[in-house]
Image (cartoon, helix red, strand yellow):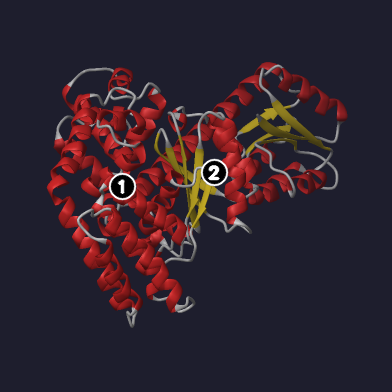
Amino acid sequence: MYRILIVDDEKIERNGIRLLLGRQGRALDIAEAVNGREALEWLSGNRADILLTDVKMPLMNGIELLEQASGLYPEMKKLIFSGYGEFEYAQQAMRYGVEEYILKPVDPEEFRKAMDKLFDALDREREAEERKAAEGNFFRKYVLNAVINGTDMEGLKLRTAGFSLDFLDEYRRMMLLETGGNFFGSGDGEFLEALEREAQGARFDCLNLNPQECVLFFLDEAADWKELAGRLNAVLTQQCGPEQKSYISVSSGLKDRSQIADRYQELELLMENRFYDLEGRVYMAKNEAESAEDVRLDDDTLMKQIRQDIRAKDILSLKEHCKRLFLNYGKNAGFSQIYVKFVFASLLKLLYEAIPEKTERELDEEMDRLYRAEDMDQVREITEKNVDLLEAKLKKDAGSVHREVETVKRYILSHYGEDLSIEQLAEKVYLAPSYLSTLFKKETGQNLSKFIKACRMEKARDMLENTHEKIGGISEKVGYPNVSYFCQSFREYYGVSPQKYRDQGEGAGAYEANQTKA
């Protein structure tokens, strides 16, 4: 809808212009003023797309109005009406960017043609602005996708030459949203609108990682991040249905772009809580961490994770969670020695229960050494020694871990076009979904969902280079029933749309050229 301001001191003339505008067949918002001074006052608080003004009026004529209005809104379209013998007004009006000049009395056909020109110009400008906004939105998502995946910032600057990355320094905090099914793959704009309403003015950018996850990058600070996350999770639950569980993790604060990748790792780590705390749906960072290494998880959560690691024989995850337990106490003088030793004695008992060869007497001796430890270094030494003992016992099974991950990878590479949920993949190797998720990341260095997406994107890229398959067909074959979501994901991953990638030519040369331009 366009807004039009009609300025004429004769009511009958204003009514006539309204009548002619009604014949244009467009939805219009029309305002009126009886002279230039009243029109300028209205424009000081309102914006018009088109100004239609008579020249001769009391208090302030049309030429004076054009001069001042052009300073307020240089891009506003302008049309003036004038009688015969007033050509000098037309010459003056041209200096202020007047596009059309119509003589009075107004000829309806001449008016229609003049307005068609103005509307066509506005339509073209609006389309150009929308394209520019869309390009900017895709660019931001491409950059964010690269940053959270650890892309070197200097390399990213080279690949995005000509575009500013300064927007990355504007983010203040991040949230990771996760749910079951293919919710984020539906391309449902209503969900994003619902989140924006519930955020109550807190601006954010949204990046879909895969059909189950998305990240929100907030540009504003919130008074209570946990309360905000709770409200957003209520929206997520309402939108995806009560049968699908949903979770949100909230990062520590962001100072600048250098912390974004670490904050994303922090979000992933916090999201691990969903495997142990099914009632809680919002997981907060406990402190303002400098990096993912500084993230503090509470002892109860860590001990649950350690029990799971030992049951699952996941020594890599066990070492990581023990490391985080040390981080909780290594620099913290707020706990008594006896409490800290009690925590690690509980850990020691769990380790010995997993090594049947060890006797109760040996456990008592080890407990005695632990309680006689003089500092945290000795506590760490005793704990790590027993973790190493468990690792030695499990080494004979180390090959099975690799085989299970390889089986899942082969299945994904063969069935990338199908619905691939973590639950379904876990069934293939007879593991719990939570364990498979952790195991896969420890073995390969990346999340299972990221591996699936990378596989699908590579397959799509290969089809674009080596086949004449339509974009919709490729989308379907690589596991994206929603072609719009596929195009969005491809662009965020590679920096260009599937069609543009194909148009640039086949082969790796075209891809590298695109990355240089992106």
Amino acid residing under circle 1: Arg
Please identify the quadrant where the N terminus is shown: top right
Residue at 30% in and 27% down: 499
Compared with 84, 107 (above or below) is above
Q: Sort mark 2 into few (<14), some (14-19) or many (20+) by Cα contacts within 10 Å.
A: few
17 sits to left or right of 184: right
Q: Sort mark 1 into few (<14), some (14-19) or many (20+) by Cα contacts within 10 Å.
A: few
Please identify the quadrant where the C terminus is shown: top left
Residue beneath disc 1: 311
Q: Is residue 214 visible?
A: yes
**Residue sitting farthest toward the bottom:** 374
Residue beneath disc 2: 279
What element does badge 2 sit on? loop
The quadrant holding residue 6 is top right
Front tag of 2 and 1:
1
Compared with 183, 348 (above or below) is below
Residue 63, x across and y down, in percent: 71, 44
